[in-house]
């Protein structure tokens, strides 16, 4: 089984410092949904792992988060792809083991899908994503979209030995070309 784990905001859709609080605010990044479809067609199971502290901050509720994910899944399917599952942590507490950079959410993916994360690509745009991937023994990949360019500029040391890509489409090109 080939698996890939994607962060949501900044990797699949446009990010916002004010949070994505409604389905109307969820706007896919150019080429991202098609990249998910291409990953599926190359044999990948695509799973999302996303911190959603806006719920814990009271900016939106779980029903709204589910509507946002329903829109993401519908648009992905219209592009020919499938996101198999969405794992999220609504907590604000940094000590929550499921909140990235902690590895709990990724380890839950491993447990539920009954697979190891060794060598599994985890695509993100932040230091949190890189640290969570490393802590779960996954393979961290960084995109420049979302917070990625800023992460790369500010956190060069953390980004050492991490492959950097312009966007999810470029990650997909790389993985398919290298039969990863």
Image (cartoon, helix red, strand yellow):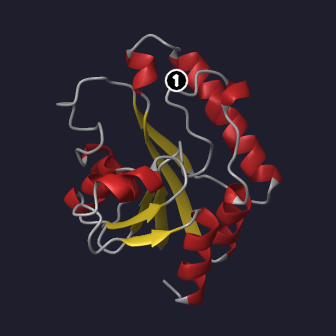
Q: Residue at x 47, y 74 (%)?
A: 1
For residue 157, side relative to residue 41 (left or right): left
Mark 1: secondary structure: loop
Q: Is residue 77 above or below residue 36?
A: above
For residue 179, side relative to residue 100 (left or right): right
Q: Residue at x 60, y 50 (%)?
A: 12
* Residue 87 visible within the image: yes
For residue 152, side relative to residue 84 (left or right): left
Q: Is residue 11 above or below residue 2?
A: above
Q: Position of residue 5 (x, y in %)?
A: 46, 58
Q: Position of residue 142 (x, y in %)?
A: 43, 62
Q: Residue at x 55, y 59 (%)?
A: 46
The residue indicated by pointer 1 is: 18
Q: Quadrant of residue 104?
A: top left
Q: Residue furthest front?
A: 153
Q: Residue furthest bottom?
A: 178
The residue nearer to you, when weighing 120 against 24, is 24
Q: Position of residue 83 (x, y in %)?
A: 61, 52
Q: Residue furthest top?
A: 58
């Amino acid at each position: 089984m080939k698996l890939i784990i994607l962060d949501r905001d900044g990797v699949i859709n446009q990010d916002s410092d004010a949070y994505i609080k409604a389905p109307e605010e969820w706007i896919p990044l150019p080429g991202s949904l098609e990249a998910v479809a291409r990953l599926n067609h190359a044999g990948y199971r695509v799973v999302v792992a996303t911190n959603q502290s806006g719920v814990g901050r009271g900016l939106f509720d779980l029903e709204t988060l589910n509507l946002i994910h329903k829109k993401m899944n519908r648009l992905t399917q219209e592009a020919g792809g499938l996101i198999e599952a969405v794992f999220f942590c609504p907590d604000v507490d940094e000590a929550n083991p499921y909140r990235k950079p902690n590895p709990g959410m990724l380890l839950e993916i491993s447990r539920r899908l009954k697979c190891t994360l060794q060598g599994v690509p985890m695509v993100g745009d932040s230091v949190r994503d890189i640290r969570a991937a490393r802590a779960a023994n996954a393979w961290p990949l960084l995109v420049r979209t979302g917070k990625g360019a800023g992460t790369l500029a500010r956190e060069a040391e953390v980004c050492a030995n991490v492959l950097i890509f312009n966007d999810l489409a470029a990650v997909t090109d790389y993985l398919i070309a290298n039969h990863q």
